[in-house]
Amino acid sequence: MQLSERLKMNVSLVPKGARIADIGCDHGYASIWLVQEGAAEKVIASDVNRGPIERAVEHVRLAGLEQQIECRQGNGTEKLVPGEVDTLMIAGMGGPLIIHILSEGKAVLQQVNTLILQPQSDIGAVRYYLWEQGFSISQEKICLEDGKYYFALQAVRREAEDGEKPEKEWQIRYGTYLAQRKDPVFQNFLNKEKNTFERILENPQFATAKWEDREEIVRKIKEIEACLASMKEV
């Protein structure tokens, strides 16, 4: 099965042999790929909407994978029994919604060892929430698809309370994993972000903006510069 670059990035972070719940499974393509490629032992494909679940059920049936993939219609983790999966994958949603799903599903979250998250927004808030809940980011990936950058995180439960805590603002917003590895796609993303904010400051229409708004843009530029500087360190 052919997946988009974004979905390929997400499923590549799933640990082999996982018992995984694909929250917001849409048509079930990622769930099917995980079983066909031997990446997952069992998949529960879940979506809040009836239409996507019905299509996922049909796609699973056509693939002959009814024994390995179970489709359930439900909101977030509400249709999951604590302990029946060890991995959660939540992709293609805003960061606040992902945090809400995890917060509402605390009983399920407590029995999970690995999270695969692909927030569409507020990724810094997601990173900080993970740390607060006892998870550390073990891998992070970025891809460019149709002119848009997407991030995906793999987080694992910490064994001790002294896991790495984001200490600087840029580490919360942009993370350290991709910066430490000097990822070229990530560097392109940062440069594009920096150029965008600099053009906003240079726009004559922005000259009359509130002082707080200008300071916010300046702060974001400084965060990007700090992240870029960290990538130049030996």
Image: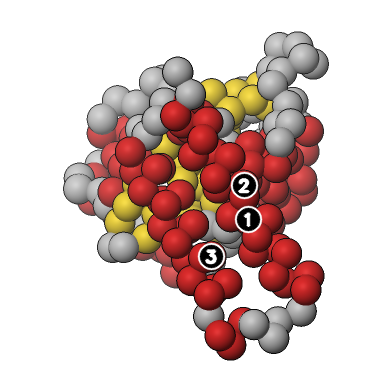
As rendered, which of 87 and 176 lies closer to the eye? 176
Task: Bin the neighbour count of mark 3 within 10 Å (Cα to Cα): few under 14, some 14-19, many 20 and up.
Answer: some
Q: Residue 178, how many percent across, how many down?
A: 46, 33
The answer to whether 55 is drawn above or below residue 150 in the figure is below
Of the numbered discs 3 and 2, the one sitting upstream in the chain is 3
- CB under 8 Å between discs 1 and 3: yes
The CA distance from mark 1 to mark 3 is 8 Å
As rendered, which of 100 and 95 lies closer to the eye? 95
Q: Residue 2, how many percent across, how many down?
A: 20, 48
Seen at 32% across and 52% down, the residue is 144
Task: Bin the neighbour count of mark 1 within 10 Å (Cα to Cα): few under 14, some 14-19, many 20 and up.
Answer: some
Q: Which residue is label 2 attached to?
A: 223
- CB under 8 Å between discs 2 and 1: yes
The CA distance from mark 3 to mark 2 is 12 Å
Please tell me how many numbered marks the rendered image carries.
3
Q: Is residue 11 visible?
A: no
Q: Which residue is label 3 attached to?
A: 197
Label 1 residue SS:
helix
Label 2 residue SS:
helix
Kind of residue indicated by mark 1: Lys
Of the numbered discs 1 and 3, the one sitting upstream in the chain is 3
The answer to whether 94 is drawn above or below residue 162 in the figure is below
The CA distance from mark 2 to mark 1 is 5 Å
Q: Which residue is label 1 attached to?
A: 220
Kind of residue indicated by mark 2: Glu
